[in-house]
Structures are given as structure tokens and as C-alpha cells.
């Protein structure tokens, strides 16, 4: 049976490419990223899969008055198999902004196919897996074969900005069953050799430095928030690395905690004004062996030091904070079955690992549902000139099909 399914998937190669490219023309940005949500893309998908052979297609729309439709859509499509157990493939339909357009060689919303790659924002993250999951259903339908397991494809909104209107909303709606085999195809490496089973804790930090604004030619009556924030950032970065990066956990890559200064808000619009306010953000990914409270203390104590030196106030806010949930056991059914399916298609045995990036799998694990993160990708997420490799889409679809057959 697998040979027949495999041939069907291979035959769909051109359709997969074309459907992904059409989908990528539709922006799906959250309001936090100055977008109007995912509704137009969800409607495209709903129309696309009408002939794919799903036995049930439902939408779960989370209310959100910030978008023009008033709703953030989530699609649950089920193809029935020969058992009561579901293989859940959860991919996300939202994307991140394109960033600096000067760094793009093509229009991020006018996809280009070149050298086996589909270029466009959201192509790899997470468009390729949306297509791979949906085409698994079409392969069984057109081959006339009933899968061993039920296929439950869940396509969610809001993954990039917290999942409140996406995966978390679906969990509250009770669409997950205790014995579901949950795959979140949102991380791995180019050959799909890694199955993520545990994540680091996360901490997003916003630091607001307040000084006193004034004319740059007369700095005596000012307190330069830019200078104080520059030193604050340097010291926090240096101290966090010195204190915590020697603590290692070999399951993760990288094996240590990471502390990255990222976004900086605009200050004054003109050159000849000393800014009285600076806002800096940090993204921290923390292994279980490191105490988050000690990380927070570095932010706090460094702010107190800057106040004594410059007279600035440093307000520290924790915008997003997550503890690392219990990992999925490496001998759990979902890890074993997915590993066998990967081996069936590729010939190699994947390795269970931990990652620093946050995925929706953490939300499932917190509720006691074992979940894994796996796909084949080149780690192009959020980068300019993001691309998806067509071979990866086809291969991942084959792996999903092999798992549905019960390998």
C-alpha cells in the first residue's frame, strides 16, 4: 500500500508547488504585526481542500475585534481511518512581517520558484507543512486507500504572536483527545533528522530607560537615556553570558541558554536632541538547569547600577514568560511511530533533541499531551529571502502518509 501512496504523493509535486505559491500571495499577519489576521488565507485553504477527501472540515473562529472580520480562523479537517486513534498534524497559517525589503531579492508576496525552491514570506514557516499535511489526505483519497489512523489536520492562527487565538483556543474547545499522536511540523534541519521533544523556558523582556531630554549642544541639564541604555545593554549581555552560558544540557542545540538583545524602539526624530527615553527588548531562551529568577535579578541589579551612575530609571517588564514544560518521553508512541515512518521514507533514524525556539507543542505538553516537533527544513524562518524546498514538502508528505499507514 505504501508504494501506491508514495507514487501518488510524487505525482502531486507540481500541484503542491502551485498551491503553496498561490497561498503565499495572501498575507496573514496578526494585528500585533500591523496585519488584518488570517481570514483571507483560511478561506483560500477551505476552498482548496474541498476535493481532497476529508470526511469533516470545521472552522473554529476565535473572536478578535482588532481585525476587520472580527475573527481569527482555525481549521480542523479530518479524514477517517481504520482505528479510533488520530494522527494530529498542527501547522500554522499566520506569518511574520517581511522585515527590511532591501534585503529581499524578490517580492516576499509574489512567490518565485527557482532551483527547486519556493521563495516568499511564510514559505518554510509554515506554508510548506500546511501543504504537506493537506496533501496526505488527497493522496489516500486518490489512491483509494483508507489510512490505518485517522488524519486530523489542524491549521491555526496566531502562532507567531502567542497562540491565544489559535492553538490555545482549540485546546479550550476540546478538539484534542488523550491518545492523539500530535506532530507540530515547525522545526528540524534540512534532512529531518531531529525530532524535538523538549523546549527551553522563554523570557521576553522590555526595558524602559528614562532620563531627561534636552538640546544636544547643552548636555549639562540633560540625562542621556541613549548612553545609559547602551551601557545597560552591554552589561546585561556580558553578565548573563558570564553567569549562565557555562551551564549546559546536551539535549539542546545550542546546549546553553541564550540571551539576545533584539528590538529597539525609536527615540527622538532629530539628530540634535538628547533622548530622554529608550526602550530595549531582550529574548531569553533558558535551559531547565538555569533559574529564571536569577536571570531576572541581572536585569534588575544592572538597572539599579545605572540609576546610581547616570540618574536614569530602568523599568523592567516581562512581556512573555514561559516555563519549560515536561518533555515528551523518547519512548512515547508518537516518537516511536514517527521515527519508524521517517525511517521508512528516508532510511535513517532520527534523533530526539531539545530546542530553544518556542512552539505550540509546549502548550500541549503542559496539559499532559505528548507532542513532537518535526519537519524537514533549512531554518529559513523569519529571514529575508525565505524559501521552502519542494523536495522537503514532498518528502514530509510521504512521512505523514507512512505514519498514517501505521508504520
Image: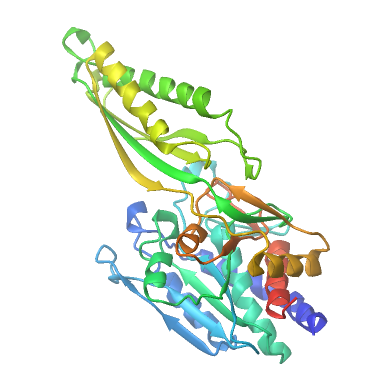
How far across and down, in percent of the image, does residue 406 sit? 72, 79
Left or right position of 197 against 2: left
Q: Position of residue 165 (x, y in %)?
A: 36, 65
180 w.r.t. 218: above or below: below
Residue furthest bottom as drawn: 144
Residue drawn at point x = 51 percent, y = 56 percent = 359
By what rule are the colours in the image chosen?
rainbow
Q: For residue 34, what is the image quadrant? A: bottom left
Of residue 2 and residue 356, the one placed in the foreground of this image is 356
- Return the residue nearer the eye: 67 or 207: 207
The residue at the point 56 percent across, 75 percent down is 180
- Above or below, 279 against 53 in this view is above
Residue depicted at x 57% and y 58%: 186
Q: Between residues 249 and 399, which one lies in front from this camera angle?
A: 249
Residue 379 visible somewhere in the drawing: no
Quadrant of res 20:
bottom right
Relative side of 403 to 224, left or right? right
Residue 219 percent across, percent down from the top left: 21, 10
Residue at the image point whose x is 78% and y is 77% from the top? 6
> Would residue 315 appear left or right of 320 to someone viewing this image?
left
Q: Please state the horizontal and vertical placement of residue 339, each as a whole percent of the image.
A: 73, 64
Q: Quadrant of the C terminus?
A: bottom right
Query: Quick check: 138 left or right of 6?
Result: left
Q: Is residue 80 in view from this perspective?
A: yes
User: How many badges with numbers are in the image?
Assistant: 0
Amino acid at each position: 500500500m505504501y508504494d501506491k501512496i508514495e507514487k501518488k504523493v510524487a505525482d502531486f509535486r507540481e500541484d503542491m508547488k502551485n498551491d503553496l505559491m498561490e497561498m503565499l500571495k495572501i498575507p496573514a499577519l496578526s494585528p500585533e504585526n500591523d496585519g488584518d489576521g488570517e481570514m483571507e488565507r483560511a478561506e483560500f485553504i477551505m476552498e482548496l481542500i474541498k476535493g481532497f477527501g476529508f470526511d469533516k472540515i470545521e472552522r473554529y473562529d476565535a473572536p478578535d475585534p482588532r481585525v476587520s472580520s472580527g475573527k481569527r480562523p482555525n481549521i480542523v479537517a479530518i479524514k477517517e481511518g481504520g482505528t479510533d486513534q488520530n494522527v494530529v498534524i498542527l501547522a500554522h497559517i499566520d506569518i511574520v512581517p517581511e522585515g527590511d525589503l532591501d534585503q529581499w531579492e524578490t517580492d516576499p508576496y509574489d512567490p518565485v520558484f527557482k532551483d527547486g525552491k519556493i521563495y516568499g514570506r511564510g514559505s518554510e514557516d509554515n506554508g510548506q507543512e500546511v501543504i504537506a499535511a493537506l496533501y496526505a489526505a488527497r493522496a489516500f483519497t486518490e489512491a483509494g486507500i483508507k489510512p490505518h489512523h485517522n488524519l486530523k489536520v489542524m491549521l491555526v492562527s496566531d502562532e507567531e504572536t502567542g497562540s491565544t487565538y489559535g492553538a490555545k483556543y482549540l485546546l479550550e474547545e476540546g478538539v484534542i483527545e488523550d491518545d492523539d499522536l500530535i506532530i507540530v511540523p515547525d522545526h528540524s534541519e534540512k534532512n529531518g533528522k531531529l525530532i524535538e521533544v523538549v523546549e527551553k523556558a522563554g523570557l521576553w523582556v522590555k526595558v524602559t530607560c528614562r532620563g531627561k531630554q534636552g538640546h544636544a549642544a547643552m548636555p549639562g541639564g540633560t540625562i542621556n537615556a541613549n548612553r545609559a541604555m547602551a551601557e545597560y545593554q552591554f552589561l546585561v549581555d556580558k553578565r548573563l553570558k558570564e553567569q549562565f552560558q557555562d551551564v549546559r544540557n546536551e539535549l539542546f542545540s545550542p546546549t546553553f541558554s541564550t540571551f539576545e538583545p533584539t528590538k529597539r524602539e525609536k527615540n527622538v526624530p532629530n539628530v540634535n536632541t538628547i533622548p530622554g527615553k529608550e526602550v530595549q527588548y531582550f529574548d531569553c531562551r533558558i535551559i531547565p538547569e538555569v533559574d529564571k529568577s536569577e536571570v531576572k535579578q541581572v536585569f534588575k541589579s544592572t538597572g539599579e547600577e545605572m540609576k546610581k551612575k547616570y540618574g536614569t530609571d530602568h523599568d523592567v517588564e516581562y512581556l512573555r514568560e514561559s516555563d519549560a514544560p515536561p518533555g515528551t518521553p523518547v519512548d512515547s508512541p508518537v516518537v516511536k511511530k514517527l521515527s519508524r515512518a521517517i525511517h521508512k521514507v528516508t532510511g535513517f533514524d532520527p534523533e530526539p533533541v531539545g530546542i530553544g525556539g518556542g512552539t505550540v507543542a509546549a502548550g500541549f505538553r503542559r496539559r499532559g499531551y505528548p507532542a513532537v516537533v518535526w519537519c524537514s527544513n533549512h531554518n529559513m524562518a523569519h529571514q529575508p529571502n525565505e524559501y521552502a524546498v519542494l523536495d522537503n514538502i514532498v518528502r514530509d508528505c510521504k512521512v505523514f502518509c507512512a505514519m498514517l499507514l501505521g508504520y
